[in-house]
Amino acid sequence: MNPFRSSKSLEYLMRQTGTDQTFSSHLFAPLVLLGCLVPLISYAEVNTFEAGQPIRASEMNHNFKFIQEQINGISSDGVSEAGCTVEQVDSSAKITCADGSTAVVPGYGTVLVYPEGEIGEVPDLTYNTGEIVIKDAGDNLLGVASGIGGTDISIELTSNKYPVAGLLNKDSSKEVLISSGLRVYVFFLDEACGGIPFATYEFYLIDLAGSLYIPNTAVDRESLLFKSKRVPAGFAGADYDEARPCVSGQFVEKAMPTIPYTLAPELTSAVYPVRLEQLP
């Protein structure tokens, strides 16, 4: 006996599932049919929603289409002979079978249709993906560009990535200036800012009235008592500011000593203007 043709079998199945509601015999067949579909439906193939969640029409249409495909795909015990179809009615699915029985799968609430543009074809692009370097007007390679220098163009001074220096195209004098892109205090063990400066950071060149230093990263930062401090020279936007006057006092900072540094001759003789370029 075809279990889907027997109202007693349907009633028994309803009792086994704990359903105490009363349905007409015309509603049993499609409901049980849907029940048999449940094990076949993968959550990876069906969109699920939560209360109050906006629903796209495309997601609902996908669910309706999937239910239809599942119904049409059943062939055991002659169930496919019922000729059931699924129709979208507002946000619900109406199932109608050839024997006249119908059922409605409730929707999930208001279906919101969002306007969507049209995605065009992916263009055929060719572009460089190599290192971004700095060159001068004479096409001389100056070094690898850095993204943390604090200026539009910053350069890595060593192969260790840090420290970096800022480069500025001085339009008024047609020259290239090189200094620090970040101006924060450096500290001194001596009064009146004498001796080797100590840095609280490891990332930037230190410019003190023409004397250049870089942090000694081989030494750990230590909490030390300093007797003076000074803001180095460097760039402030499109301008170069000289080092500020020394400030005496007592200052406790966690810092590392610095090392005197001499710029490469290619940098000191760079031809105005310098530019960024990405290698192939």
Image: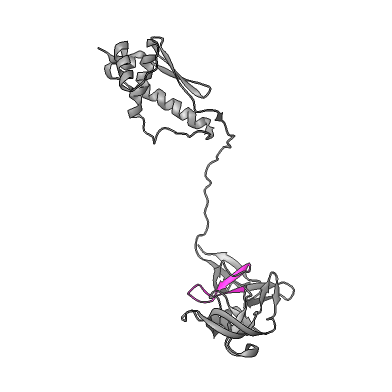
Residue at the (41%, 27%) spot, across then down: 66
- Residue lying at the far front in this picture: please name it: 20
Q: Is residue 166 visible?
A: yes
Q: Is residue 39 above or below residue 274?
A: above
Q: Where is residue 258, by image quadrant? A: bottom right
Q: Is residue 263 visible?
A: no
- Residue lying at the far right in this picture: please name it: 172
Q: Residue 82, percent across and down?
A: 35, 13
- Residue lying at the far top in this picture: please name it: 99
Whether the magenta-drawn stretch holds residue 68 is answered as no
Q: Residue 186, percent across and down?
A: 60, 80
Q: Nearer the viewer, residue 166 or 94?
A: 94
Q: Nearer the viewer, residue 15 or 91?
A: 15
Q: Residue 235, percent across and down?
A: 67, 73
Residue at the (57%, 70%) spot, across then down: 134
The part of the chain drawn in magenta is 151-166
Q: Looking at the rendering, in which quadrant would you find the N terminus?
A: top left
The image shows a total of numbered marks equal to: 0
Q: Residue 30, percent across and down?
A: 38, 17
- The answer to whether residue 249 is left or right of residue 4 is right
Colouring rule applied to residues: one colour
Q: Nearer the viewer, residue 58 or 188?
A: 188
Q: Is residue 39 above or below residue 182?
A: above
Q: Where is residue 11, by image quadrant? A: top left
